[in-house]
Amino acid sequence: MSVHNVPSDPEGPAPAAAAPPRRWTLHGLNNGLIFSATYHGVRTLPRAVSYAIGRAGTWIAWRTMTRTRAAIADNLSAVFPAEDRAALERRALLTLRCYADDVIDFVRALGQVDAAPERVFEVATEYATLFAGLRQRGKGVLLLTGHFGNWEIGSMLIGNVLGLPLTIVAMAEADPTVNRIRLEIRNQMKADTIEVRQSLDTALHIRRCLTENRIVAMLVDRHYGKDRIPVTLLGRPAWFLRTPFLLAQGTGAAILPCSIERVAPGRFRVYPAEPVYVTTDLPREDALRHAAQQVATAIETRVRAHPEYWYHFYRYWDAQRDDYNGLG
């Protein structure tokens, strides 16, 4: 049940040798029927009923989706290296429950944020001041985050509450019904969408948005093919997307690492890090890597604070190792 992407788990145990992750959107639960039922059901049912259904559903998923449970546990081993497999798999249940709660609160907020934003976001005026300062330079803002917390609800804050121009860069969904609903949701949040891998000039579209002093939001912790830059995350080598850092270097746009975390039922707080700028004082590649590492460190700080909000449902570290060995 998700307005984000839902994990999949084919029958049978995980293979002995880790394979590169399949495309995130290709799984049975992320289809138009289930997605649509979730979207409309959560908006209709009382919050307590949705939470109860979410708890039951995630417990069933945790018990039956053995590969997903093991993948979450393996990912969390970087945060809790001293814990055994059983303890890590218990943490996987909490991750699934937090994910369900985030989804429920996101969908419910769609009908509430315009009328009463203070019920959804804490200290929203502080964020208005932050973005005003970053946009004073007239070069746009790259809002970068990872698959952590409730990244989608940030669009409501920027578009609906603060009324700032926002563009979301995202991969198109495999299911056309799912993709249509997600685009409708972003329209409600007054956000434009650039779908990656749909044309050869995606980077030019993003650059144009930055020159128009828009805020461009991207998830950077899953790279696409050779669009990657090495970082250290939770003490391990990983790849982040390279394009946003190239764009920041070329346009002078500010980079704002940021996460949005659920602090109470239906209530969220933004945790921005210090703005990052791609320096001109270092050789080009060193400057890009330095900026990327600053973003990785900001994401790592929040993951260590709340690892239950870290939403990778495949073996994240296996994908990173495969690519570092030249297989990705």
Image: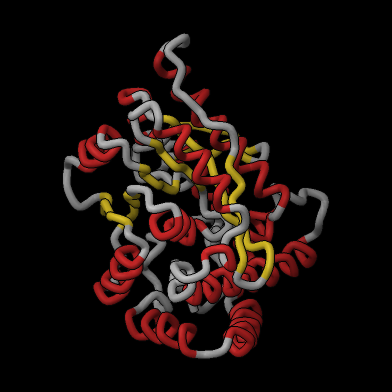
How many numbered marks have been drawn onto this rendered protein structure?
Answer: 0
Percent position of residue 213, x then y: 31, 36
Q: Is residue 280 above or below residue 60?
A: above
* Left or right for 13, reference 3: right
Q: Is residue 151 above or below residue 199?
A: below
The residue at the point 68 percent across, 68 percent down is 264
Which quadrant would residue 96 be assigned to in this image? bottom right
| Coloration mode | secondary structure
Percent position of residue 240, x then y: 46, 39
From the viewer's side, name the closer residue of 66 and 75: 75
Percent position of residue 2, x then y: 47, 74
Q: Is residue 322 visible?
A: no
* Left or right for 324, reference 186: right
Q: Quadrant of the C terminus?
A: top left
* Left or right for 146, reference 242: right
Q: Is residue 133 above or below residue 31?
A: above
The residue at the point 32 percent across, 49 percent down is 167
Q: Is residue 84 visible?
A: yes
The residue at the point 44 percent across, 76 percent down is 111
Percent position of residue 196, x then y: 27, 50
Which quadrant would residue 285 be assigned to in this image? top left
Q: Is residue 81 above or below residue 189?
A: above
The residue at the point 54 percent across, 60 percent down is 150
From the viewer's side, name the closer residue of 323 and 12: 323
Which quadrant would residue 63 be assigned to in this image? bottom right
